[in-house]
Amino acid sequence: MKKNTERKEVLALYVVQFSNLIIPLLSFPYLINILGVDNFGKVGFAQTLLLIFCFIIDFGFNLSAARYISTKKSENNSIYSTVIIIKLFIYVVLFFFGNFFVLFSAFNQADKIIWLLVSFLCFGSVITPNFLFNGLGINSVLAIISLLCRIFFLIPLFIFVNNSDQYNLAIILQFMPNILIGLISTIYVIFKLNVNFNFKYFDFNLAIEQLNEAFHNFSASGFTLGFTYAIPLLVKSFLGDAALGIYTIVERLLNILKQAYLPLIQAFYSKSCFFYETRDWANYAKILINVFRIDILIGVFSLTTNYFIGEE
């Protein structure tokens, strides 16, 4: 029964993940054609800022808090409220200090407006409880919510973005789904999962514990992702928006392969944490072996497909 549940979760995640890959493939060729490479580079700049802001706001809680939930499911109200409040605090600090810095920086007016837009739109990261869905092993629910929200904003993108000067509107329509995802997932958490947010559930000791544990995830990822996020910013600084536009096109295509591995991590993370905490090494090893086998298959399939279909 458990195996069937895991298989359904993995299958659902792959179906949704595949759909999430198709949507950008439908939208970004249109945006390149309408906006041009220069202004599409501005969209790429906004995307980079959004990734950086969301990375800081999440602060590694998607792993640390998910691990906590997978082993202590009776304390969901406390962990949910505590983590959301911490993320809200990080967002407020980032919003005010970031915009104050940019206001007096050497950024041109267009980039200042983009920064301001992104600082509003990344609020979706505050209210989206990825860690809760991850800890409960129901990532497919959040994935479906995400898919439907992105489809909902896809049609207005094609209708209203129709000239090269509308890159700010394109940014809003591309990233507004994050806010809607956060709102709908919050409603689902409260009414379907019966997990409630309240400031009275905030646990100071739990907050310190989570910050300490999450910091390890945050700092470890920061070294690798920091380098990744720095590249588009350096491209923009030294080569301009047109070069960043080309870089963004290539980077989005590469993300298709990267996304193929995410459903495996999402489907098995909570169970692997549980088996690790309970020291059930036999089941823990089975999960690692199964994930490793599927990773190898994905890699071999990608290389084979590229060899026979890709151009030299």
Image: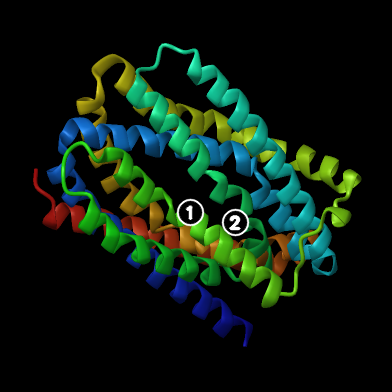
Decide: few, some or many residues near mark 1? Use Cα within 10 Å; few <14, some 14-19, many ≥20: many
Badge 1 or badge 2: first in the primary sequence? 2
Question: Which quadrant of the structure image shows residue 73?
Answer: bottom right
- Residue 128 image offset from top left, x and y in percent: 59, 56
At a point 38% along the width and 46% down the height, the residue shown is 172
Q: Is residue 83 left or right of residue 186?
A: right
At a point 16% along the width and 52% down the height, the residue shown is 307
Decide which of 196, 257 is in the foreground and name it: 196
Residue assigned mark 1: 178
Decide: few, some or many residues near mark 2? Use Cα within 10 Å; few <14, some 14-19, many ≥20: many
Question: Which quadrant of the structure image shows residue 188?
Answer: bottom right
Please say if the residues under marks 1 and 2 sit with CB atoms less than 8 Å apart.
yes
- Residue 194 image offset from top left, x and y in percent: 75, 74
At a point 68% along the width and 36% down the height, the residue shown is 90
Using the image, tell me which numbered label, if any, was put on residue 128. 2
Relative to 305, is 57 above or below?
A: above
Q: Is residue 64 left or right of residue 252?
A: right
Q: Quadrant of the C terminus?
A: top left
Relative to 216, is 186 above or below?
A: below
